[in-house]
Amino acid sequence: MIEPTATTDLETLERAIDPWLRHMAWRRDFDRWRERRINQERYQDERLAMLVQVAGLLEGLRLLDLGAGMGGFAVAAALRGAEVTACEYNPAYCRIIELRAARHGLRLPVVNAAGEALPLPDASFDALTAWDVLEHVRDPRAVLGEMRRVLRPGGHALITAINRRAWVDPHYHIRGVNWLPRSLAEAIIAARGRSKAGAAFRDMQRLSEMHYFHYPELVRLCETFGFRVRDLREEQLRAGRLASRRASRRAVRALLRRAGLEEAAYRAQRRWYVGMFELALTRVSA
């Protein structure tokens, strides 16, 4: 672990991160996207709010950030007072997490492990986050089982998962590929120059290797492992706190709300169109 007294300058962090961004150079917004990766901990307000929505105050919360990536969320949560352990499969990312934590003078434990076999005690965390993780693991069932094991009874896991019917694929940013056979979809991805072939990732990155889900299928799978499932976006919609960035979408939602159809429209979008599900799982005691 890098000692928190060490000075980690921005250039050192950039040198560690940049090799892991080159495969995305095709993005039109690459410079802005890169800056958000470099300073990832500054852009976590929305996900921190989701954690507070489910788990309450972060001060003293025993939190496992599973699949912590480059550590932006783990560091942001630690800065808010949570007792964070970061778990990451990619050793290079573990180093980046340590560098990011050291910039803020944080002593943040980092565990290099796969989600299918966590070297952590039973019932040792109040909450767990797994952002953008489930699609990349080898065995989602084993990961869900380990998540339940390390959570205390009544503890919460916040996860994201990709919709098998996502119209715009969240990884390749190509419309319609998830409605095609995987072999054809991957040929289109390669032809568009968006393949991640040659990148140094250890986790699964090809579209045919990743785990995307239909919403009812995902809910049933989580319930199998003793979780109660909540759709965080649907809860925000009911509370009047689900924001739409575009004025046109806000106008459509207002019309649907007046007609009493907003929730039904949301569920239809969740089933047939939306790119990502954002769920809270609560470990039931039994």
Image (cartoon, rainbow, N blue to C red):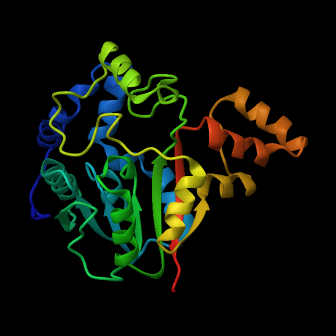
- Tell me the residue at 34%/77% (across/down): 150
Horizontal and vertical percent for residue 33? 35, 31
Horizontal and vertical percent for residue 219? 56, 59
Horizontal and vertical percent for residue 79? 34, 63
Residue positioned most to the right: 259
Q: Nearer the viewer, residue 224 or 73?
A: 224
Number of dots carrying numbers = 0
Q: Is residue 96 above or below residue 106?
A: above
Horizontal and vertical percent for residue 95? 13, 52
Left or right: residue 71 versus residue 200 is right
- Tell me the residue at 46%/52% (across/down): 160
Q: Quadrant of the N terminus?
A: bottom left
Left or right: residue 224 versus residue 254 is left
- Residue 228 location, quadrant: bottom right
Q: Is residue 116 above or below residue 165?
A: below
Residue positioned most to the top: 191
- Residue 2 location, quadrant: bottom left
Q: Is residue 211 above or below residue 149?
A: above
Question: Visible in this render: residue 180?
Answer: yes
- Tell me the residue at 78%/31% (across/down): 251
Left or right: residue 120 versus residue 259 is left
- Tell me the residue at 52%/55% (across/down): 218
Left or right: residue 280 versus residue 59 is right
Q: Nearer the viewer, residue 139 or 97?
A: 139
Q: Nearer the viewer, residue 207 or 22?
A: 207
